[in-house]
Amino acid sequence: MKKILIAVDGSENSKKALLKAKEIAQLKSSDVYILTVIENLKGNPYTVSQDYQNETTKTNIQRGEEILEEAKEIFKDYPGKVEADYRVGDVADKIIEIAEEKEIDLIVMGRRGLGTLSRAFLGSISNKVLNNVTNSVLIVK
């Protein structure tokens, strides 16, 4: 496993995923890509106005940057390559897209996370990723 993608959202399960991925990465001397995805509110029928969407997006980007800083802190002593970035869009779709783009060998993510309405369908992101990639997926709980 030369390339590991860790999908994080600041939840307890994503922190567990970071720690498990670090453990695996150290064993395999893997490159690590940490990703958080900010959900795109455009076109969401539950948002009231464009101003609300813009302000919420700014807040979500700031939170995404904080999540990435916390994740990078966990990997601060990791001797290999570590990249951290955020994307805006559908969470599962972006994870799948980055996994393909970076030719990831292993995707590590928490079983349940945070998000809109506390994820009315808990685990739906990990389920969608698991069923739509050819990569290996480790779901941590």
Image (tube, helix red, strand yellow):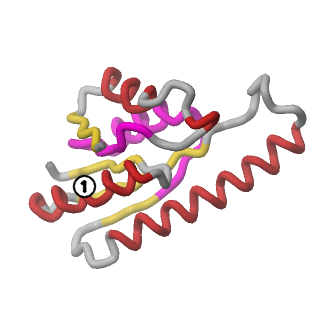
Tell me, yes or no, whether the highlighted magenta stretch contains residue 16. Answer: no
Whether 89 is among the magenta residues is: yes
Q: Residue at x 32, y 70 (%)?
A: 75
Q: Which residue in the structure is indicated by mark 1?
A: 21
Q: Position of residue 47 (x, y in %)?
A: 81, 32
Secondary structure, mark 1, is helix
Q: Residue at x 78, y 27 (%)?
A: 46
- Amino acid carrying mark 1 in the image: Ala
Q: Residues within 10 Å of mark 1 (few under 14, many from 20)?
A: many
Decide if residue 61 is on the left or right side of residue 18: right
22 w.r.t. 135: above or below? below
Q: Is residue 37 above or below residue 12?
A: above
Placement of the C terminus among the 4 image quadrants: top left
Does 2 sit left or right of 111 as displayed? left
Residue 105's spot in the image, x, y percent?
Answer: 21, 42
> x, y (%) of residue 81?
28, 66
Q: Residue at x 55, y 32 (%)?
A: 119
Q: Quadrant of residue 48?
A: top right
Q: Nearer the viewer, residue 99 or 27?
A: 27
Taking 57 as reference, is 44 above or below it? above
Question: Which stretch appears magenta?
Answer: 85-112
Disc count in the image?
1
